[in-house]
Image: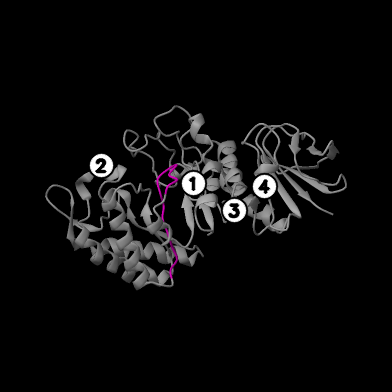
Amino acid sequence: DLNYVPYVLKEDGGYDFTKINDDYFQHAKRMCEIAKEYNFELALVALWCNYVPKTWANNMLPLNTMPFDCVDRYIEKVDETFTQFNPIYIISGDTDLNEEITRNYYNKASDLLREAAPQCIQTLHVRGRLMEIPEEMINRMDFYMFQSGHNAKTENLCMTYRLPEYFVENYPGKPLINSEPCYEQMGSSGRIYGRHHRFNIRRAAWQSLLSGACSGITYGAAGIYSWHIYGKNFGSAIGEGFDMPNPWQQAIHYPGAWEYGDIKHIFNEFQVTELISKQKVLLNNTEEIRVACTPDEKLMMIYLPENTTIKLNYHFSEDDECTIIDLNTLHRECGRIYNHKDICYLDMHVFEHDVLYIIRRK
C-alpha cells in the first residue's frame, strides 16, 4: 500500500535511473534504524537480479534494467544511506552468473562498495541450486551463501547437502551458510501442489549444518518474506510459481521459527562452535543421514530423518555418552552404542519423527 519506489517513474511505468527518489531511501533508512533499535544485524541486497541484464528475472521482466553507467551513482546512494548501520552487503540477489555482462554489474557494485565501505563484509545471494561460482567473484566474497531452495522434486531435495559438499571441496575455505532453505508453509516451486512444513525445514537445516555449512542457517516463512496482508494478490504465475501465502499475522506464529532457534541452544549446550563433515564413516545406504564431528572428534552429531539403526565405520566405546533429541518435541533419551566386527552400531530410537544423535567421548 505504501508503494515506495527508488526512482522517479517514466510514462511507461519504468524507472528513470537518472532521477533517484530520495523518499524511498529515507523510508528504507528509517526501517533500518528501527531494526537496529531491536538489535537486528542487517544484511542488505545491493542489486536484486531483475535490475541486472541477462539474469533469469531480467529476461522475464526487462522493463527496469539499470544502465551500467548508473551503477556508480546508485552505489554511492546505497553507501550514503546504509553504511552507517554496518550491514552485511549482499551484492547480488537470487542471481545466476552465466553471462559476462551480469558479472560485470556485480563486480562493479562489489568494488565500489569495497572502496566506499571497506569495514562492511560482502557476499552473494545466488539463485536456487547454483553450484558454479566464477573465480573472480569467489575471491570477492568474505563468506559463501548457497540456496538449496524450495523445489520439492526428489532430485532437488538433496541440494541441502550436495551444495555445501561442493563448496567445501571446490572453493577456498570460508564460512558457509545455506541462505535460502525451503520456507515454512511456502508452496513448492514450479506450481507443484504442496507446501513445506516443519519436518521439511528441519531436514533442510540439519542436513546443511552437518554437511559443511555450519556457520549458521536462515529461516523463512511464507507470508513474512513478502509481508503479505489480507485482501492482496500474490504473483503465483511468475518466477518460480509459489502458491498463495498466508497473511503475515498468521505466518508470524509458525512454529518452525522456534525450531530454528532451538538449533542454537543445542549448539550452545554441547559447546559446538565448528563442525566438519564426517560423511565417509556412514555405512548406511543413504545420503539422507548426515554425519559431522567437531575438529577434535570428541563430539559427533548425526541427523536421522527416518528411524533406522545407524552403522558407522568408526569406533566409539559402549561407555561413551549418546544423547538422542526428538527434534519435533525436544524430548530426549539415552542412546545405546555397541560394536560388532569393527562396525559401530547406534540403536534405533523410540520417537516418531526426525532426531539428532549426539555422541560425546568420555
Of the two numbered discs 2 and 3 on the same chain, state the one appearing first in sequence. 2
Q: Residue at x 54, y 51 (%)?
A: 168
Magenta part mainly helix, strand or loop?
loop
Residue beneath disc 4: 278
Foreground tag (1 vs 4): 4
Which element carries disc 1, helix, strand or loop?
loop
Is residue 313 part of the magenta span, yes or no? no
For the C terminus, give its image quadrant.
Answer: bottom right
Q: Nearer the viewer, mark 1 or mark 2?
A: 2
Report the residue marked by disc 1: 220
Three-letter amino acid code at disc 4?
A: Lys
x, y percent for residue 6? 25, 58
Q: CA distance from mark 3 to mark 1?
A: 18 Å
Label 2 and label 4: CA atoms lie apart by 41 Å
Q: What's the residue type where badge 2 is placed?
A: Asn
Q: In this image, 22 relative to 160: left or right? A: left
Q: Which residue is tagged 3?
A: 214
10 Å crowding of disc 3: few (<14), some (14-19), many (20+)? many
Which residue ends up furthest to the top in the rendered image?
193
**Label 4 crowd bin: few (<14), some (14–19), many (20+), radius 10 Å:** some
Residue to which mark 2 is pinned:
59
Nearest to viewer (mark 3 / mark 1): 3
- Cα–Cα span, label 2 and label 3: 34 Å
Picture disc at residue 101: none
How many circles with numbers are drawn on the protein? Answer: 4
**Location of residue 106 by image quarter:** bottom left
Circle 2/circle 3 CB separation < 8 Å = no
Which residues fall within the magenta stretch? 120-132
